[in-house]
Image (tube, rainbow, N blue to C red):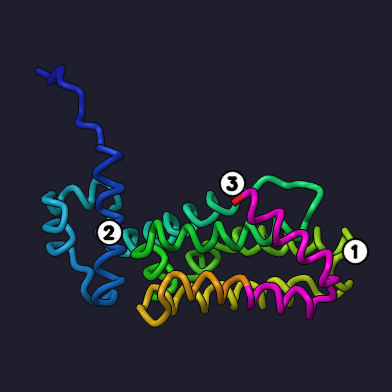
Amino acid sequence: MLSTMSPKVADPAQRVALIEAAARLIAEHGSDALSLRRLAGEVGASTMAIYTHFGSMDEVRRAVRREGFARLGAHMSSVEETDDAVADLILMGAAYFANALTNPNLYRAMFMDGPADEADAVVGVETFFQLVQAVERCVQAGRFDDDDTTRMATQVWALSHGVVTLHLAGFLPEEFALESFRSGGQNLFKAFGDDPRALARSVKRSARVA
């Protein structure tokens, strides 16, 4: 006689809890600390729950990277486009910083733990394309020099990541990190060719929105 009971549905909240616990273990102890039993113990789940949600520990690592970049992408996408492309780019930087403060373990883990394979290596590329597109808008608006936008976006990313990493590591208090973020960004945008007076107006506009 077949059972009439429905199969147990995987709890999405438990899946998120496992991802965040895995990110915390990677961030605090390195990827070698991520084991089946330790992860299950972190959230009070059975080891079978991990297989139910992910299938393997490699897939847990992939899920951490995907979740980290998904949250970063969501923060960056929350910036609405206006007629001031530079102000929008500044706000995108602020969103990047806010995401790291909101999800510090995921942020650390998605950059600390290398990709599991070639397919995993492309995770997060779309968030970089968001930044490239934002820089391209500044070029099209005549604010930045008509140059290699990928190179320029890489420099913006490097500045943002450097400041965030120093803050999360405890080397820069939040006030100093934010000031470094602002002043470093303004210096970079001037180097990209933006007019100082127009940049000052964009900074004020972004501050009002933020």
Does residue 149 sit above or below 1 in this rendering? below
Q: Disc 2 designates what residue?
A: 56
Q: Residue at x 27, y 65 (%)?
A: 24
Give the label on residue 79, or none: none
Secondary structure beneath dot 1 equals: loop
Mark sitting earlier along the chain (1/2): 2
What's the residue type where badge 1 is placed? Gly
Q: Is residue 107 left or right of residue 193?
A: left
Horizontal arrangement in the rendering, residue 173 relative to residue 151 (left or right): left
Please name the residue shown 66% across and 73% down the image: 185
Q: Is residue 192 above or below residue 69?
A: below
Question: Which residue in the structure is indicated by mark 1?
Answer: 142
Element on which disc 2 rests:
loop
The residue segment tinted magenta is: 183-209
Marked residue nearer the N-terminal end (2 or 3): 2
Q: Amino acid at mark 3?
A: Ser
> What residue is at 66 percent from the left and 61 percent from the top?
90
Name the one closer to the observer, 48 or 87. Answer: 87
Q: CA distance from mark 1 to mark 2?
A: 50 Å
Sequence-wise, the earlier of marks 3 and 1 is: 3
- Magenta segment, principal secondary structure? helix
Residue 115, by quadrant, is bottom left
State whether residue 50 is above or below residue 104.
Answer: above
Residue highlighted by disc 3: 78
